[in-house]
């Protein structure tokens, strides 16, 4: 079939019911429910009666239909300029959902090895979205797909415009550096999730950095500064899952062994890219998982992959000796790095804050408010340099 034509389009959305029957019928066994409940400790199902249940049901139906379009019209090659600017609006019963740059995101998902039917099943109505207690000060809402593989976050119009403007360069960066630590953005939707017509809600879908989450023991959000960077830990024995911050990490070290040099270099490349986009206020997400005895070294659960060098594509002679990474044989290996004792989940997220007039004024105010202390709102060059310095000082 031909690829979708560029420019705004409005179509009547297909129904997700038929596509969801197989998912719901195959996942209701007793053992599956018990195992699923155990893996969701600290998360909360958005079930009927939850204040966000209606909103997430509309998101699920809308994402199912949007993915069906990319399945019916799969990308035939790298995205064109028209693909980055396409807007598809699908009309549902009681709400509308738009898909921005749909063909470009479909191509990106394919390049990551994500099957569209798996993506559709995870984000569609086959299971409730999950909510967790966020330590972010933003007004955004955060969700996980029922299998915890995908992360959804509401956004403001300004963030959406910035990300769309940077999307072609973002895709180029991932092509050049396939093991980049940048979060993998998978789709962006504006939706009128109140009865039409109504105000728009924007949300983004990305791969969860913290996946698979079953054995993760600690989670951190690092910005390389100290103001407002402490979270009160959950009481001992509490099922609540908290993402801690910089000051909670004091006295700790990321022990990567021979992988440290690669990590430092990739952080430098990724933050340089964000600095060139005039972006700041992004975070390095980290999580720890202690390795089992049989997972250490070149065990059966690890595969030794040779990737492109962090400098870009290499000649066949060079590719065998540069940028070799130990990657666990896991579904989201792009954001997993093994040290001698721990498995680390690592990813750079929140890539949409531009250093414009508003942030410059905020920088001046914080300079007066917090003399001699480090805070997040600084120039992109200083922000990138400081985060890389933090990583260098806290790794070995």
Image (cartoon, rainbow, N blue to C red):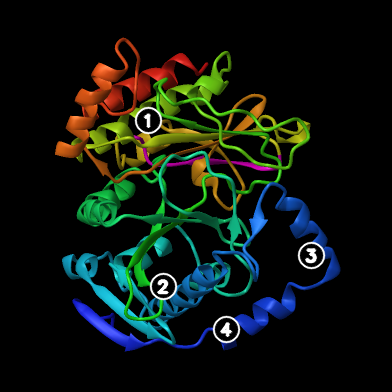
From the image, state whether disc 1 or disc 2 is nearer to you: 2
Magenta region includes residue 55:
no
Q: Tell me which residue sits at (38%, 46%) in the image.
A: 178
Start and end of the magenta stretch? Answer: 300-310
Give how far apart the Cα atoms at labels 3 and 2 are: 32 Å
From the image, state whether disc 3 or disc 2 is nearer to you: 2
Give how far apart the Cα atoms at labels 2 and 4 are: 22 Å
Residue position marked by numbered label 4 in the rendering: 19
Q: Could you tell which of marks 1 and 3 lies nearer the N-terminus?
A: 3
Give how far apart the Cα atoms at labels 3 and 4 are: 20 Å
Q: Quadrant of the N terminus?
A: bottom left
Q: Tell me which residue sits at (36%, 55%) in the image.
A: 155
- Left or right? Give the position of 34 relative to 301: right
- Left or right? Give the position of 43 relative to 183: right
On screen, 21 above or below 363?
Answer: below
Q: Tell me which residue sits at (26%, 50%) in the image.
A: 172
Instruction: Give x and y (percent) for residue 97.
Output: 37, 75
Q: Local crowd at mark 3 within 10 Å, few (<14), some, or many (≥20)?
A: few
Q: SS of the residue at dot 1? A: helix
Q: Could you tell which of marks 1 and 2 lies nearer the N-terminus?
A: 2
Q: Local crowd at mark 1 within 10 Å, few (<14), some, or many (≥20)?
A: many
Q: Local crowd at mark 4 within 10 Å, few (<14), some, or many (≥20)?
A: some
Q: Residue furthest right?
A: 30
Mark on residue 267? 1
From the image, state whether disc 2 or disc 4 is nearer to you: 2
From the image, state whether disc 1 or disc 3 is nearer to you: 3
Q: Could you tell which of marks 2 and 4 lies nearer the N-terminus?
A: 4
Task: Give the quarter of the image for residue 234.
Answer: top right
Residue position marked by numbered label 2 in the rendering: 193
Give how far apart the Cα atoms at labels 1 and 2 are: 37 Å
């Amino acid at each position: 079939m031909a690829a979708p034509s560029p420019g705004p389009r409005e179509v009547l959305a297909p129904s997700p019911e038929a596509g969801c029957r197989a998912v719901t019928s195959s996942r209701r066994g007793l053992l599956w429910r018990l195992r699923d409940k155990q893996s969701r400790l600290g998360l909360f199902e958005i079930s009927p009666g939850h204040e966000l249940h209606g909103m997430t049901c509309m998101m699920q139906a809308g994402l199912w239909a949007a993915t069906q379009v990319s399945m019916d019209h799969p990308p035939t090659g790298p995205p064109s300029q028209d693909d980055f600017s396409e807007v598809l609006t699908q009309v549902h019963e009681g709400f509308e959902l738009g898909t921005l740059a749909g063909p470009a995101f479909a191509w990106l998902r394919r390049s990551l090895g994500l099957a569209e039917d798996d993506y559709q099943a995870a984000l569609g109505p086959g299971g409730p979205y999950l909510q967790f207690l966020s330590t972010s000060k933003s007004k955004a809402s955060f969700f996980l797909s029922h299998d915890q593989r995908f992360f959804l976050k509401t956004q403001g119009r300004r963030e959406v415009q910035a990300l769309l403007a940077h999307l072609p360069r973002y895709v180029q960066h991932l092509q050049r550096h396939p093991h980049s630590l940048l979060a993998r953005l998978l789709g962006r939707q504006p939706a009128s999730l109140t009865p039409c017509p109504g105000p728009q809600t924007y949300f983004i879908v990305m791969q969860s950095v913290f996946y698979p989450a079953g054995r993760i023991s600690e989670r951190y959000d690092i910005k390389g500064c100290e103001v407002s960077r402490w979270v009160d830990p959950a009481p001992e024995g509490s099922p609540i899952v908290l993402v801690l911050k910089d000051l909670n990490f004091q006295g700790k070290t990321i022990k990567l062994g021979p992988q440290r040099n690669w990590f430092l270099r990739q952080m430098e490349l990724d933050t340089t890219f964000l600095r060139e986009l005039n972006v700041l206020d992004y975070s390095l997400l980290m999580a720890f998982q202690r390795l089992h005895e049989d997972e250490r070294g070149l065990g059966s659960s690890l595969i030794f992959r040779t990737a492109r060098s962090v400098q870009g594509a290499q000649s066949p002679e060079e590719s065998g000796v540069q940028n070799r990474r130990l990657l666990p044989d896991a579904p989201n290996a792009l954001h997993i790095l093994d040290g001698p004792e721990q498995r680390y989940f690592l990813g750079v997220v929140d890539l949409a804050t531009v250093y414009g007039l508003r942030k410059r004024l905020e920088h001046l105010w914080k300079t007066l408010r917090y003399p001699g202390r480090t805070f997040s709102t600084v120039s992109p060059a200083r922000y990138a340099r400081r985060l890389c310095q933090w990583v260098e000082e806290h790794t070995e």
